[in-house]
Amino acid sequence: MKIYGLISWYQESALWLAAAVTSAAKFCDHIIAVDGAYLLYPEGRARSGAEQSAIIQEVAHANGMGCTIHTPDTVWEGNEVEKRSFLFSLAETVASPNEDWYFVLDADVVLDQVPEDARDRLAATELDAAEVKMFERDDVYTDRKKAQAAMSMEWPINNFTCRCLYRAVPGLTVKGNHYTYVTPDGRKLWSNDGDQVEALNLTDLRCEHRTNFRELVRRNTQRDYYKRRDAARIETDECNRCGEQGNRVLPFDWEEEGDALSARNITVCDACYPDALQRSRDQILALGRDPDGLNYQGPTE
């Protein structure tokens, strides 16, 4: 059994790329990386700088991993759905079907802790997905309220479960939106609608999501892309409230996990968004936390 680290990236820090690939070597045998901007990404191009591809390849080889890199000749017209679908298709050309596993990573993720028996547990399970533990630290000085709060309290680390390991099922693809992974027989290995398959608990494998430490220009560009994507309604899902077409995602059903909070993401339409957002904030208040100072980064744009 081999584990393939799947990385979708565009215009990333060489340092972050090196860190992501180096950390993946703790668990992965081979890196598969796909470059290029989404069509709606502001001023996006088909490829990043050549030095970024070189970093991925050289660091992978230095850590004893194989490496496959794809650079497109144009931007991804189907945006996230097309790019991530292609990533699975490319991995399928080298993976052993139904035996190997895909570990879906972003360039701002580093593996922090990998249990010694993680591979054995993947090899033994009959399930087709696995969930790990993800955590986020916050750069409190990017926001005045957070900075003030952090001066008078211990700022918590945000912990949450993330489903990012998938069996190499032939034909696995991304359908409708970037968070729905579907097999040819219609099973959802990942979905926000509650209809996803059971997953192996591998939450003693920990990863850090470093998105809060991105430079300001990158965060703003990312926010602009989300606004364009939502306005274009290119990713569709039913509204969790009324069943109509939804186009906004926000965290909901907040729970305490130690000193931090966790939530699941739900999709809502524009009409239901204000009420759903208020209910989400009320849940946070009921747990004794401040919604405006919460250490959580969800795709609410």
Image (cartoon, helix red, strand yellow):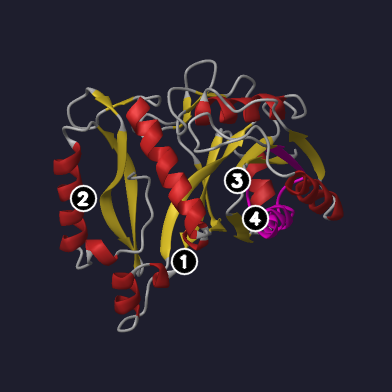
Q: Which residue is mark 3?
A: 105
For the residues bearing labels 3 and 1, Cβ distance under 8 angstroms: no
**Which residue is drawn at the image coordinates 41% and 46% (left, top)?**
223
* Quarter of the figure that contains the C terminus: top left
User: Callout 2 environment at 10 Å: few (<14), some (14 to 19), or many (20+)?
Assistant: some
Q: Which residue is mark 1?
A: 137
* Quarter of the figure that contains the N terminus: top right
Is label 4 or label 3 in front?
4
Q: Secondary structure at mark 1?
A: loop
Q: Quick one: label 4 or label 1, which is nearer the N terminus? A: 4
Separation of disc 4 and disc 1 at Cα?
18 Å
Q: Which residue is mark 2?
A: 280
Residue pushed farthest top? 185
Separation of disc 4 and disc 2 at Cα?
34 Å
- Is 61 on the left or on the right of 197, as rendered? right
Residue 67 percent coordinates (x, y): 80, 41
Question: In the image, is residue 49 above or below residue 141?
Answer: above
Residue 262 percent coordinates (x, y): 34, 56
**Which residue is drawn at the image coordinates 65% and 25% (left, top)?**
74
Which residues, given as a range, are shown in magenta?
11-33
Residue 82 percent coordinates (x, y): 55, 24
> Based on the displayed image, in which of its 4 quarters is residue 84 positioned?
top right
Residue pushed farthest front? 43
Q: Quick one: label 2 or label 1, which is nearer the N terminus? A: 1
Kind of residue sitting beneath label 1: Arg
Q: Which residue is mark 4?
A: 13
For the residues bearing labels 4 and 2, Cβ distance under 8 angstroms: no
Q: Quick one: label 4 or label 2, which is nearer the N terminus? A: 4
For the question of whether residue 124 can be seen, the reply is no
Kind of residue sitting beneath label 3: Leu
Separation of disc 2 and disc 1 at Cα?
21 Å
Q: Secondary structure at mark 2?
A: helix
